[in-house]
Amino acid sequence: MSKVESSPQKNGSSTFQKVLDVIEFVGNKFPSPFILFSLLGLAVLIISAIFDGASGTYIGKGGKLVEVKILSLLNADGFRYIITSMVKNFINFPPLGLVVVMMLAMGLAEATGFVSALVRKILGGVPSWAITATIFLIGINGNLASDAAMVFVPAAAAAVYASMGKNPILGMSIAFAATAAGFSANFIPAGTDALIAGITQTAIGNVAATANSPVHPLINYYLMSSSVIVLTVVGTFVAEKVVAPRLEKIEMKKIVEGETEDHRITPEEIKGLKYAGWTALVYIILLMVLMIPESGLLRDPKTHQLLPKSPFLDGIIPILFLLFFSIGTAFGIGKGVIKKESDIPKFLSQGLAGSLSFIVTAFAAAQFVAWFNKANIATVVAIKGAKFLQALDFTGVTLVVSLILLAAFVDLFVISGSAKWLVLAPVFVPMFGLLGYEPALTQAAYRIGESSVNSVTPLNYYVPVMLGIMSRYIKDDKIGMGTLMATQIPYALGFLISWTLWLLLFMALNIPLGPGANIFIK
């Protein structure tokens, strides 16, 4: 691969690619991620002071009017908050624990050569599009593990692509788009479905039209399950035709842990894979013993269910850690690279070393996110946006598309899907209901807009994780946020357009969005 260009490409590429070139060029001129999030945090402090006291109101639980005001952090109370919460903000930063734990296990699996050997054994000769589609299918359905998939799947996909001699950043970009932008789609209902439906339930009683409307975790299931196929097809096309050509210009580091120049499987690796295979089988059987019986330890102790909440879902990260730790260790023993117990922590530390750049960035990102939420800027922006759209008095398809775009816009400022819906649901569920639309449609429109742009908002907790993965593989340390955004914007646009059209097709054909959940109120 040739050296990365220092300016936008001047070739015969398409207009869209040229736009992405500019975005990448400008974005990569930004400061390092640590400095960038530090500057964003400073901007939050200034904005909170300028707009101190600005407020917005929305209808909360029980129909009560809730007022939210922007709070200045440039005063005595704000100073005390900043000083006393700094360590807590960092420790409680959602991706921190996920990344460190998973990188330990992934580091062991990569450093022993397990990932490389497994990929070369299974995927040799498989066409590129099939691998891409498989990652999309896995990543989109990864929301079953909630945010954990945004750490595990991109890291694994990058390692898989590197082991195949392909661009690891392409693998990471595919997986991040799948897990973040495709977050709302799924074959198997997840905790998010129950959470969002619960909020919708609180808003249906505000008007008589929706008071008896069906609201349950599966009201969007037909739409969201079929969307997995739509997004996989669209995402695969975008990856192969738009993103992959862009990344050909990036020069990778020549030496990557766990990667081998020779793609043939050695006898030692075959032995290691056998050890790993038997270990995985035993692990899965043990997992089934803990999951299948009604009284299984990994089921909810009260409901005895796995969905929507259970120790299995809450403990998915430790479960994945133990899986990769076990098979990585077994492979290392079989291959002969782990000869004594002291070799294991050495391989584990290699994985942790790969996450150090993320940990540094996470400290600044954690403060920025915490200050942004503390100042209530995000909530006021959401309230103002909802009222602006309400004042436009749109109807029909125009209203649906407008809600999708509003949800996408607000997602650039508020990453929590439930937090946004708490503000928007009391406004839009009654509004749509008075126009003859079921809450299922309102919720679906919101989820499409909220999900599609998850991977392009700088407020996404896992953007620093992706930048950390990139730094592990990319040779040029000047490449950063711009390159990441230029790879994610095509996916976001592709998902937003195709997903919107898919919903409009459901509307045109009056296809139920889920069990008992129609488009129109009967």
Image (spheres, rainbow, N blue to C red):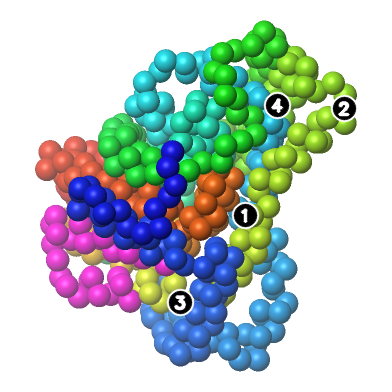
Q: Residues within 10 Å of mark 1 (few under 14, many from 20)?
A: many
Numbered range of the magenta stretch: 384-413
Can residue 86 be spotted in the picture?
A: yes
Check whether the beta carbons of the residues at disc 3 and disc 4 lie within 8 A of each other. Answer: no
Residue at the spot of label 1: 358
Which of the two labelled residues, at mark 1 and mark 4, occupies the earlier sequence position? Answer: 4
Label 2 SS:
loop
Q: Which residue is mark 3?
A: 377
Residue mark closest to the camera, 4 vs 2: 4
Q: Which is more N-terminal, label 1 or label 2?
A: 2
Label 1, secondary structure: give it. helix
Q: Helix, strand or loop at disc 4?
A: loop
Residue 298 in view in this figure: no
Q: Which residue is mark 2?
A: 341
Q: Amino acid at mark 2?
A: Glu
> Which residue is pictured at 62% across the width and 85% down the height?
78
Pointer 4 residue: 112
**In terms of sequence position, does the residue under pointer 3 or pointer 1 come before the other?**
1
**C-alpha distance separating marks 2 and 3:** 51 Å
Amino acid of disc 3: Ile
How far is disc 3 from disc 4 in space, using C-alphas?
47 Å
Question: Dividing the image into 4 quarters, which one contains the N terminus?
Answer: top left
**Front-lying residue, 392 or 2:** 2
Callout 1, which amino acid? Phe
Could you tell me residue 492's position as x and y percent? 32, 50
Distance between the alpha carbons at the discs numbered 4 and 2: 14 Å
